[in-house]
């Protein structure tokens, strides 16, 4: 066999070996990627199961008891007082937990805060607990995206919040919605991470805008504590009226956006779009 033929044969063998090696590397990379995706999926499923279990357990073991406990404001105040200065920290933790998983309604807790800490003290501790709970929601949503949101927010509710995609007027819209009672504030917190909104701007706006809603409840609780029932009844009546008006205003905001979506799909916040946004 001539030298040229030998060299050609060796070159062909080397080329073939290189291709086989490259194929094996590509196959190994693809296999590793598949394993990584599977591991992430398993981790997400396990985390979701743990969260669901925690919510269910908290609701049936703590939720109903806490509601009854908090509604007895004198007992609740005495219980917090038995912990000394730690009672305020315990209250903030309860408020943060209530913000995240909603095992108890917010209104009785705010009234109890006013009863225990006064109008302004109750406002401060409720606001601080809500802020901490919002941070937890944001962190979890950024980590798990739409999969987590769907655990707490129905698809119908997600699709009704098209106004979150209106970047131009989003901050003003958020300010209005959070200023008025009876709007789904904590649900919006779950969804906001799936938009381009600046999180710190969002927290600043919403913390400020929550004040009127919270302070009316803490004022009512403080009036009850001082046995000023006429003031408590007046505050409660005004809050209820504002709540009815607020629900009407929110319905108009979401309804107007829904009508706009029927004419223009650009601002749609359908589930598929949120899933794409959560992967960015």
Image (tube, rainbow, N blue to C red):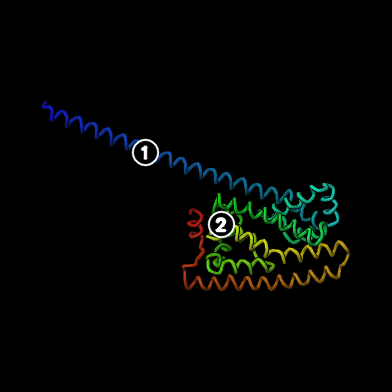
Q: Give the vertical position of 197 relative to 36 (above or below).
A: below
- The residue under the point 65% across, 62% down is 206
Q: Which residue is mark 1?
A: 27
Using the image as rendered, state which of residue 91 and residue 272 is in the foreground.
Answer: 91
CB contact under 8 Å: marks 1 and 2: no
Residue under label 2, please give it: 193
Q: Residue at x 66, y 70 (%)?
A: 247
Q: Is residue 160 visible?
A: no
Q: Which mark is residue 86?
A: none
User: Which residue is rendered at x = 49% and y = 72% of the image?
Assistant: 262
Query: Tag 2: Cα neighbours inside 10 Å, few (<14), some, or many (≥20)?
Result: many
**Secondary structure under the numbered disc 1 in the rendered image:** helix
Q: Residue furthest left?
A: 2
Comes first in the chain, label 1 or label 2: 1
List the single residue furthest toward the top.
Answer: 1
Q: From the viewer's perspective, tell me whether residue 269 is left or right of residue 221.
A: left
- Point out residue 114 in the picture as x, y percentages from the top left corner: 80, 60
From what the image shows, is residue 34 above or below residue 109?
above
């Amino acid at each position: 066999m001539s030298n040229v033929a030998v060299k050609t044969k060796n070159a062909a063998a080397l080329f073939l070996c290189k291709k086989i090696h490259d194929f094996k590397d590509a196959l190994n990379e693809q296999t590793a990627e598949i394993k990584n995706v599977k591991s992430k999926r398993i981790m997400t499923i396990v985390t979701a199961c743990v969260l669901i279990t925690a919510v269910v357990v908290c609701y049936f073991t703590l939720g109903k008891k806490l509601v009854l406990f908090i509604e007895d404001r004198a007992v609740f105040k005495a219980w917090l007082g038995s912990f000394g200065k730690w009672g305020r920290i315990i209250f903030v933790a309860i408020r943060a937990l209530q913000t995240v998983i909603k095992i108890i309604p917010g209104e009785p807790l705010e009234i109890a805060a006013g009863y225990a800490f006064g109008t302004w003290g109750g406002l401060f501790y409720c606001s601080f607990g809500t802020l901490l709970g919002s941070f937890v929601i944001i962190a979890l949503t950024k980590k798990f995206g739409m999969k987590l949101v769907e655990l707490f927010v129905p698809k119908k509710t997600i699709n009704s919040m098209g106004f979150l995609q209106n970047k131009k007027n989003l901050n003003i819209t958020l300010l209005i919605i959070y200023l008025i009672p009876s709007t789904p504030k904590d649900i919006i917190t779950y969804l906001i991470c799936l938009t381009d909104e600046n999180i710190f701007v969002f927290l600043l706006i919403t913390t400020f805008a929550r004040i009127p809603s919270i302070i009316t409840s803490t004022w009512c609780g403080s009036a009850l504590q001082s046995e000023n029932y006429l003031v408590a009844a007046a505050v409660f009546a005004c809050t209820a009226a504002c709540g009815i008006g607020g629900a009407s205003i929110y319905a108009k905001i979401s309804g107007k956006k829904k009508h706009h979506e029927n004419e223009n799909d650009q601002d749609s916040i359908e589930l598929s779009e949120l899933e794409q946004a959560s992967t960015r």
